[in-house]
Amino acid sequence: MTVRTTVAVATTAVALTAGFAAPAMAAQATGATDNHRATRQAVRAAVKDGVPGVTLTAKDGRSTWSTTAGVGNLRTHAPRSADDRYRVGSITKTFVSTVLLQLEAEGRLSLDDTVEKWLPGVVHGNGHDGSRITVRQLLNHTSGIFNYTADETFARTYFLKDGFFEHRYDRKTPGDLIAIAMSHKPEFAPGTSWSYSNTNYTLAAQVIEKATGRPYGEEIRSRVIEPLGLTGTSVPGTRVTVPQPSSRAYSKLAETATGPTYDVTELNPALAYGSGEMISDSADLDRFYTALLKGRLLPPKQLKEMKTTVAIEGLPNAGYGLALIDRELSCGVHVWGHDGGIHGSTSVAVTTADGKHSLAFNFNGDWSGDTDAVIDAEFCGE
């Protein structure tokens, strides 16, 4: 099961050459490993499929287990670390949604408020009408608002090789990103269908700022990162580097499944803003989703709203809540979490409904590897 939650428009593919793949096959594991044989195999399979390297941490009850495979640097062959920090892409959305639900619990806004109430005149033009769209519809992607990363000019400028290397440090504002979306017609009338749109969370982050008078990143820090002690997690703003310890990130920067591999580690993450800006590590993501599902961040009413899902067309075993995906695995187990992708980085974080068994991992490449196989191995394998 794959839900398209990346900031990038197209993933690109090719297996690594034998020269890179050979040293990447060794895997390292820490902690108890008896119950994770299938997970180790799935991680190795991802590297064999062409992913440069993988870092993964699982927590089951009081037991924490980590494994790595492949390399964190294709030039030096340095291995990945269990402590690697990485860009988490659309996992950012769950943090944004959590803050909005906290604000609702405090009576400072309602999910049924219109976007127009908080951002007057912003969602307007080409059939877009903020007075007909609610905050809830932003969060569950039923707004119909066009996805700005699907704009062809934006894609050529930021996701293909020539454009990326010329523009990766550009400073686009949220207003710039929203304006791109408003230049297109809506996908459908609000509330009548489902379509993943990064614009929804650009707007959601703006609602946080309007309701609190503070940058959305500061609200995430004070409400989630600091209370949970997420020392590897940050909202970088316009900072172009990833804090250490970290690995390099790689992409094909092409529409085809062949071609050279490029180091895309450095970029201005403000291009993703509230839809995919954040950085974290696997242990922090496990802690965040565990706390969320155990009710430590939201009252029962708001957590129930977050877990109320809508159908995702073409994916009968998954539903989308308020930045929380419910997926049923091959063995019948349900896990809740989110996927995330941004240039050179593919991440997943999920946990069981009781928060007792969690998993978070990252591929430092965006063109290959089966994330679903890794999830299924951890929760359904031996």
Image: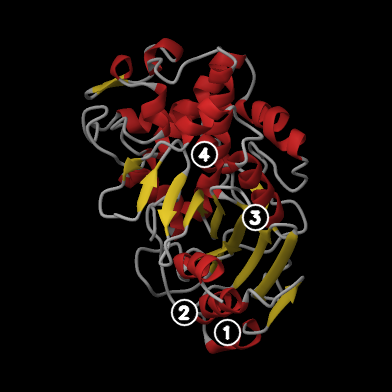
Q: Residues within 10 Å of mark 1 (few under 14, many from 20)?
A: many
Q: CA distance from mark 2 to mark 3?
A: 22 Å
Q: Secondary structure at mark 1?
A: helix
Q: Residue at x 54, y 67 (%)?
A: 262
Q: Which mark is residue 15?
A: 2
Q: Give me the residue at 26% from left, 27% from top.
A: 190
* Closest to the observer, 336 or 301: 301
Numbered badge on residue 21:
1
**Which residue position is annotated with label 4?**
93
Labels 3, 4: front one: 4
Look at the image and tell me in which quarter the N terminus lies.
bottom left
| Residue drawn at the location 37% of the way across and 57% of the way down | 10
Of circles 2 and 4, the one toward us is 4
Residue type at mark 2 is Ala
- Which of the two residues, 71 or 140, is positioned nearer the viewer here? 140
Classify mark 3: helix, strand or loop.
Answer: strand
Q: CA distance from mark 2 to mark 4?
A: 30 Å
Sequence-first tag of 2 and 4:
2
Mark 2 touches mark 1? (CB < 8 Å): yes
Q: Which mark is residue 86?
A: 3
